[in-house]
Image (cartoon, rainbow, N blue to C red):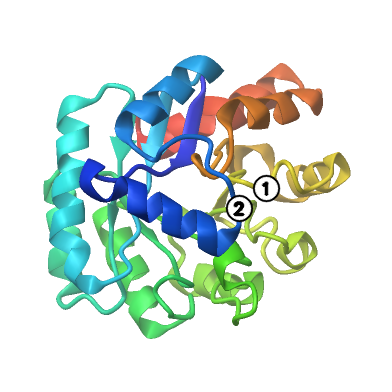
Amino acid sequence: MIIDFHTHIFPEKIAERTIENLARRSNITPSFNGQYEGLIEQMKTAGVTLAVSLPVLTKKEQFDSVLTFATNINKTSKEIISFAGIHPLCEDIKGKLQAVKDAGIKGVKIHPDYQDTLIDDEKYIEILTVAKELDLIVVTHAGVDCAYRECTTMCHPKRARKVIDRVGHSKFVLAHMGGSEMVDEFLTHVAGSDVYIDTSYVLKYITKEQFYKILEKHGEDKILFATDAPWSSMASDLEILDSYNLCKSTLDKILYKNAQKLLNL
């Protein structure tokens, strides 16, 4: 079994222009078209059993439409679990996260760079605090974002650690190995704390030695296999992970057992 904990798909009517815009801004060639069928096809090719789709709200007004899109996916798909999204400017955070919970959705995605808000802002503290109360997973982009490389890093590992210590939410996930392009900062400020990290997009850029340092210091129970598809390829990332020659028990935890536990499957 393989679970990809971090993927993206978009409604058909906006998928093409959204993918084109993001690809241009980040200078990344997508591995599929950003639609449901494309993700399913990539999963089949790579042998991935289940994928988690993580929508991002760039405006607070998108909450309802994204919640509806996620709910419909979860009602019709056996291969994809969709989270909802939340924006720090949303009114009635508690009510909106309760609506996510009532819809049977397991968590929400936030993106400090796209939402122009530092991760330790009080609005994100509120989101994480309420999510903890409701037992909802929160996944955040962490580290440098390719489309915002010249801007302030909104989820620097040092700031993320402040949030981890303040809120203490055991279902908090820092994407991109805890900080894209910030391995040393993650190892210094975050590694070993009670937070999950995922491997999305970074396996082709970090070294095997860096991966092993993270594994040793953070622990095999808190790492989730993820790709950020369509911004990376499932098959390619699995090949890289396989080249690390991890023992079977560790590899199984990273590939699916940790995700099963977090998702309560």
**CA separation, marks 2 and 1?**
6 Å
- At x 16%, y 78%, the residue is 91
The reply, left or right, for residue 6 in relation to residue 185 is: left
The reply, left or right, for residue 223 in relation to residue 265 is: right
Query: Which label sits on residue 32?
Result: none
The reply, left or right, for residue 189 in relation to residue 111 is: right
Please determine whether, in this image, residue 112 is positioned above or below residue 118: above
Residue 50, image x, y percentages:
41, 25
Q: Residues within 10 Å of mark 2 (few under 14, many from 20)?
A: many
Q: What residue type is labelled 2?
A: His
Q: Is mark 1 on a helix, strand or loop?
A: loop
Please determine whether, in this image, residue 126 is positioned above or below residue 203: below
Q: What element carries label 2?
A: loop
Label total for image: 2
Query: Which label sits on residue 202?
Result: 1
Please determine whether, in this image, residue 258 is positioned above or below residue 214: above
Q: Quadrant of residue 264?
A: top left
- At x 48%, y 80%, the residue is 118
**Which is nearer the N-term, disc 2 or disc 1?**
2
Q: How crowded is mark 1: few (under 14 residues within 10 Å), some or many (20 or more)?
A: many
Marks 2 and 1 close (CB-CB < 8 Å): yes
- Mark yes or no: residue 104 visible: no
Q: What residue type is labelled 1?
A: Val
Q: From the image, tell me which residue sits under label 2.
A: 176
Residue 72, image x, y percentages:
15, 37
Residue 255, image x, y percentages:
57, 27
The reply, left or right, for residue 47 in relation to residue 176 is: left
- At x 52%, y 27%, the residue is 257
Residue positioned most to the right:
209
Residue 206, image x, y percentages:
78, 48
